Amino acid sequence: MNDLKIAIIMLGPPGAGKGTQARLLSSMLGFAHISTGDMLRMAIKDGTENGIRAKTFLEAGQLVPDELVDAIVYERLRHSDCRRGFILDGYPRKLSQADTLQRILDQDNVQTITVCISVTDEVLFVRLGSRWMCPNCNRTFSEELSSGTLKGGCDKCNVSLVHRADDSTDVIAERLKVYHEQTEPLIRYYQERGTYIMVDGDQVPAKVFYAIHGALEERMNSGAAKKRE
Ligand code: ADP
C-alpha cells in the first residue's frame, strides 16, 4: 500500500521561475500546484474580502499578514487534488509560516522536498522588468524568450498579455528586499529538514527543469535504496 504524501516546496526569489517550474512539476507528477500569489491576485480580481485586505500589500511588494495567507493555503490543501501530493509556490515565505506549515505536515505525515531556485538580484531585476503575464492562466512570458508569442497574446488562452502591477522598478526592489530579509532564512530552515535541492535558475526553463528532475530522481532512488537496505 502506498499512501505516502509529498509536499514540494518551491523556494527562491521573485522572478526565479518558481511558477514555471511548479507548473511543469505539477503536470509531470499529477500534484496540485498551489500558488499563493495567483490565489491572492484572483481574490483581488474577484473583489472578495481577502482580496480587498491583500491588495495594498501586493501593490507595495510587501507580505500579506500570515493569518490571511495561512487560511487560504489550509483551505486549499483540503481539496481532493492534494490527496497524493502538492507543490507550494510562494508559501511559506517567512519562518512563522514555515513553522505553521511544518505542524500541519507532521500531523498528516507528509514528506517534504524543498526545491530552491537560485538567481542573482541583477538577473532578477532585468527579468521582472521585462516580464509579461496572461491574466487568465497566470503563465508568465519574458520578452527575450517568447517574442513571437507575445505579439499574439497567450497562446493557450488567446488573450492579451499584461504587465503585473508589482513588476515596476520600485516594487521589484521592495520585493527583493523582503525576500532577502524574510524568505531567505528559510533556505537554512529547510536545509536542516528533509530533502533539499538547489538548482541554478539562470538558465532557460527547460534546463532548470532538467536539473530539478535529475536531482529529484536521484533523491528518490537513494531513498528507495535506503529502504531496501
Ligand atoms: P513573486 O514570487 O514574483 O514575488 P508571487 O506571485 O509569489 O510573486 O507573490 C506576489 C505577492 O503576493 C507577494 O509580493 C506578496 O505580497 C503576496 N504573497 C504571496 N505569497 C505570500 C505569502 N506566503 N505570505 C505573504 N504574502 C504573500
Image (tube, rainbow, N blue to C red):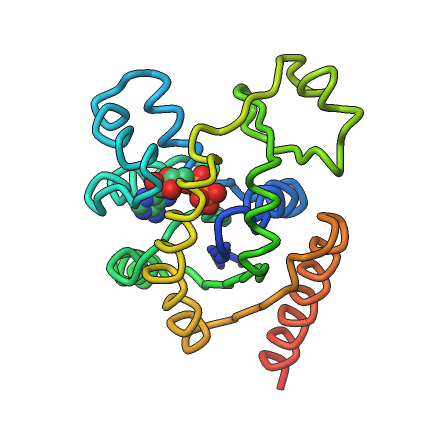
Q: Position of residue 86 (x, y in %)?
A: 48, 47
Does residue 94 appear to the left or right of 114 in the view shown? left
The answer, for residue 45, to whether it is visible in the render is yes
Residue that appears at 42% across and 48% down: 173
Residue 37, located in which quarter of the rendered image? top left
Residue 100, located in which quarter of the rendered image? bottom left
Whether residue 46 is situated above or below residue 124 in the rendered picture: above
Residue that appears at 37% across and 59% down: 183
Within the displayed image, which quadrant is ligand 1 positioned in? Answer: top left
Does residue 138 appear to the left or right of 107 in the view shown? right
Q: Position of residue 221 (x, y in %)?
A: 68, 72
The answer, for residue 35, to whether it is visible in the render is no
Farthest front residue in view:
170
Q: Position of residue 215 (x, y in %)?
A: 67, 67
Residue that appears at 46% across and 72% down: 194
Farthest bottom residue in view:
229
Q: Position of residue 111 (x, y in %)?
A: 45, 63
Quadrant (top left, top right, bottom left, bottom right) of the C terminus: bottom right
